[in-house]
Image (tube, coloured by chain):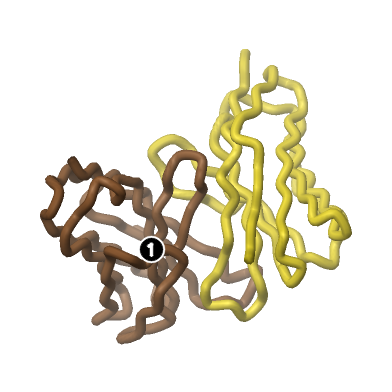
Chain colours: A yellow, B brown
Amino acid sequence: GEDVEQSLFLSVREGDSSVINCTYTDSSSTYLYWYKQEPGAGLQLLTYIFSNMDMKQDQRLTVLLNKKDKHLSLRIADTQTGDSAIYFCAEGRSGSARQLTFGSGTQLTVLP
Amino acid sequence: NAGVTQTPKFRVLKTGQSMTLLCAQDMNHEYMYWYRQDPGMGLRLIHYSVGEGTTAKGEVPDGYNVSRLKKQNFLLGLESAAPSQTSVYFCASTQGPRFPNEKLFFGSGTQLSVL
């Protein structure tokens, strides 16, 4: 079955880069997503990558995909205190009404 | 533009009580979803709907029922609440599964505690 795994916690210093990792098992995944959840709020889409891409950059965010190893990572450059949140990796298949399978989320804490 | 609105935001129930969570979206979205979020387990899909009058089971549907009588509303019911249903519940909607532009829009969540 489908499974998406992430480490639960990550702490970094303000100004450093953060790298959040994710592995997935469904080889038929079409798209892979990163969502951000701030305290007391719902999830918001940060970025996504097609499964036929290796990398995508969006301002401070860089997504790397290793399809062979089914490994996805999110790099946040110049991490700020406002980046402290839970980050969810998710995978989905085009045309699937059941939408996404989410990982357990990584709590990112940015230390001053 | 309110987006996705969930009510109530917090609720405490006793075991065996019933309640309904309401999700309303004003974006004319076809697809709506109910998820539950538990510590260390991410979001799990309870039920979903691909249009008015339709519902389907997700990953963890037992103990829940849903209805989509109007396109803009998706109701989640607990007929006899159990402590295992203590969780944060999120509603989400999207126009359709036309990835990646039709992203999920989430409500702010309902914190439910069952004693």
| Type of amino acid under label 1 | Trp
Q: Is residue B31 above or below residue A23?
A: below
Rendered view: B11 above or below A97: above
Identify the image quadrant of the C terminus of chain B: top left
Residue B75's quadrant in the figure?
bottom left
Residue B104 in percent (x, y) is at: 51, 63
Q: Tell me if B107 is positioned left or right of A4 in this view.
A: left
Give the percent coordinates (x, y) of residue B44: 47, 57
The residue pinned by badge 1 equals B34
Q: Residue at x 79, y 51 (%)?
A: A71
Residue A86: image location, x then y, percent: 55, 38
Q: Secondary structure at mark 1?
A: strand
Residue in the foreground of this view, choosing between A45 and B62: B62
Q: Chain of mark 1?
A: B
User: Residue A96, relative to residue B9: is it above or below?
Assistant: below
Residue lying at 84% horizontally and 59% vertically, measured from the top left: A67
Name the residue nearer the viewer: B83 or B66: B83
Query: In what quadrant of the picture does the N terminus of chain B appear?
Result: bottom left
